[in-house]
Image: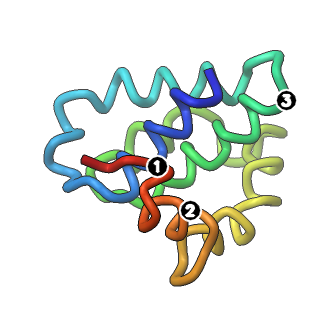
Amino acid sequence: KIGSIMALTTAVNVWESSCLVKYVDQLAKAVKEALTNSDVGVREEGRKFFWAMFACDDTVAAVERIFDGRSREMKNLNKVRDEIDAEWEEDGVMVYLVENGVLQTH
C-alpha cells in the first residue's frame, strides 16, 4: 500500500492535472483510506498524498470535503504540511527521487 500511495502522490505532483480530473473521486477515496489506515507508514504517505492533491487546482475540492477543517485529522495534517511541502521544493527528497529515476513518472 505504501508504494501505491507514493506512486499516486508522485503522479499528482508531476503529471499534468488534466489527466487526473476523470479520476478525482477515486483519488479522494484513496487519500481517505490511506489517512485512516492502521499502518503508520501508510498514514504518513497518505498525508503527503493529501497535500499533493490539495496543491492541485483540479483535485483540491475533492480533498477539502474529506475532513472538517476543525477536525482532529485536519489538525494532524496541518502539523506536517510545511515539512511535506519542503520535500517537493527544489532539491527536496522527492524531486531527487524523481530526477534520478527512483520514482518513475513516465
- Marks 3/2: CA distance? 19 Å
Question: Looking at the image, is mark 1 or mark 3 earlier in the sequence?
Answer: 3
Closer to viewer: mark 3 or mark 2 = 2
Rendered image: mark on residue 81: none
Amino acid on which disc 3 is placed = Val
The quadrant where residue 44 appears: top right
Amino acid on which disc 1 is placed = Leu
Looking at this view, is 54 or 67 the one in front?
A: 54
- Marks 1/3: CA distance? 21 Å
Q: Residue 64 location, x and y as percent?
A: 50, 44
Looking at this view, is 102 or 3 the one in front?
A: 102
Q: Residue at x 73, y 46 (%)?
A: 74
Amino acid on which disc 2 is placed = Met
The quadrant where residue 32 appears: top right
Q: Which residue is under mark 1?
A: 103
| In contact (CB < 8 Å): disc 1 and disc 2 | yes
Circle 2 — which element? helix
**Image quadrant where one finds the N terminus:** top right
Q: Which residue is under mark 2?
A: 94
Circle 1 — which element? loop
Q: Residue 47 location, x and y as percent?
A: 67, 44
Q: Give neighbour class at mark 1: few <14, some 14-19, many 20+ (Cα, 10 Å).
A: some
Rendered image: mark on residue 40: 3
Question: Looking at the image, is mark 1 or mark 2 earlier in the sequence?
Answer: 2
Closer to viewer: mark 1 or mark 2 = 1
Q: Residue 14 location, x and y as percent?
A: 33, 58
Question: Quick one: which residue is furthest to the bottom in this view?
Answer: 90
Q: Residue at x 32, y 50 (%)?
A: 105
User: How did the renderer colour the structure?
Assistant: rainbow
